[in-house]
Image (cartoon, helix red, strand yellow):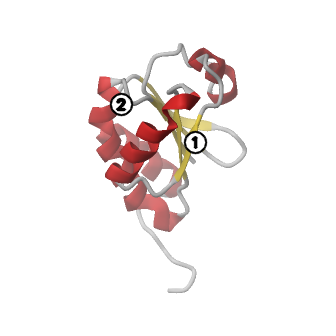
């Protein structure tokens, strides 16, 4: 699962979001799930939804329902220091295979995902 915490007011979040969507589209056929969590206040759900639609974010998208975005830290990633954006890739069983505080490097993110899945894709239907 690819998890990204972002906000509409966060410049680096806006810059990396198209890459996040592209990476998800590359690997969703292999079972990668995307969950985005907006750290915007709940009353900003309208602009959040508009941005997600503009970006064609087709994963699971959430808005944190508390006014304090720092309350997200422990449930998402105890090693997170609170900087946005924050991205992690979590393997089944909860092992974090990639973590980025601040804007992620798209190549490093793809390498981490490939490191988990392997370089070659073999569909069950094609065997």
Q: In this view, does 37 lie above or below 82?
A: below
**Secondary element at image label 1:** strand
* Residue at image location 31% in from the left, 34% down from the top: 14
Q: Which part of the image, by quadrant, shows the C terminus?
A: bottom right
Separation (CA) of disc 2 from disc 1: 15 Å
* Residue at image location 39% in from the left, 41% down from the top: 109
Nearer the observer, 108 or 64? 64
Residue under circle 1? 62
Residue under circle 2? 13
Residue 40 is left or right of residue 19, and the answer is right
Residue 105 in view of the camera: no
Nearer the observer, 25 or 111? 25
Residue 100 in view of the camera: yes
Question: Could you tell me residue 107's position as x and y percent?
Answer: 30, 42
* Residue at image location 57% in from the left, 80% down from the top: 124
Q: Which residue lies furthest to the right in this view?
A: 93
């Amino acid at each position: 699962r690819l998890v990204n915490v972002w906000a509409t007011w966060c410049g680096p979040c806006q810059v990396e979001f198209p890459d996040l969507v592209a990476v998800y589209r590359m690997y969703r056929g292999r079972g990668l799930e995307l969950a985005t969590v907006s750290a915007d206040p709940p009353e900003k759900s309208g602009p959040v939804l508009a941005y997600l639609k503009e970006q064609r974010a087709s994963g699971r998208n959430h808005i944190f329902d508390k006014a304090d975005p720092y309350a997200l830290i422990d449930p998402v990633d105890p090693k997170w220091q609170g900087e946005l954006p924050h991205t992690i890739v979590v393997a089944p069983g909860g092992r974090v295979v990639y973590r980025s505080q601040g804007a992620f490097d798209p190549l490093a993110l793809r390498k981490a995902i490939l490191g988990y899945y392997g370089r070659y894709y073999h569909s069950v239907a094609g065997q």
